[in-house]
Image: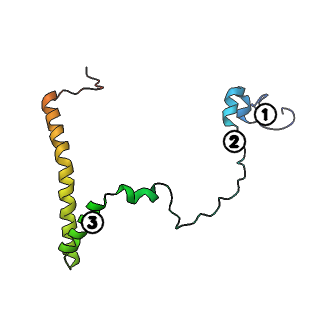
Amino acid sequence: GGGGGGHKGRGAATGPAIMLMPPQIRATFVPNPPLKHMKPLPKRRKNKCSGVFALLKQFESERSLRERQSKLQSEKPKNPKALKELVRKERLAEMEANLVPLVTDYRNEQKESAGEYEGMNCYN
């Protein structure tokens, strides 16, 4: 035998393998300290509005809001399918109006650059 028991071939290293590592590496395996206990957060009122939300009505343009509401009231169809179609067409027209300048700028930029890519290119 080999003395006081245990497995043969271990030599002097009888503890966990982490104890054989240098202290700076061993420090990375040390668990974090336990979390500090904190008091529970105070309950907040659900209906209380503060911050930017209180100023929201000042920033909205009331005229455009009124125009949109009056337009919907005058043209509002009675069946849900027609209303859904109207809203879809309205959103599509608004989206196209926003995209047209972006697309034209992009196309002009492509014409000016003649397809050359300016930026990080691994083939240059």
Mark before the other along the chain sequence, 2 or 3? 2
Secondary structure, mark 3, is helix
**Distance between the alpha carbons at the discs numbered 3 and 1:** 82 Å
Q: Looking at the image, which residue is at 23% across and 76% down? A: 80
Q: Where is residue 18 in the image (x, y as percent from the top left)?
A: 70, 33
Amino acid at the residue labelled 2? Asn
Rendered image: mark on residue 32: 2
Work out whether 57 lies above or below 19: below
Q: Where is residue 8 in the image (x, y as percent from the top left)?
A: 77, 33
Quadrant housing residue 84: bottom left
Mark before the other along the chain sequence, 2 or 1? 1
Work out whether 85 lies above or below 64: below
**Distance between the alpha carbons at the discs numbered 2 and 1:** 25 Å
**Distance between the alpha carbons at the discs numbered 2 and 3:** 58 Å
Reading the image, the residue beneath label 1 is 14
Q: Looking at the image, which residue is at 69% across and 27% down? A: 24
Reading the image, the residue beneath label 3 is 66
> Local crowd at mark 1 within 10 Å, few (<14), some, or many (≥20)?
few
Amino acid at the residue labelled 3? Arg
Q: Are marks 2 and 1 in contact (CB under 8 Å)?
A: no
Instruction: Looking at the picture, tell me which residue is in the foreground, 1 or 40.
Output: 40
Q: Where is residue 42 in the image (x, y as percent from the top left)?
A: 65, 61
- On screen, residue 27 versus residue 3, left or right, reads left
Q: Residue furthest right?
A: 4
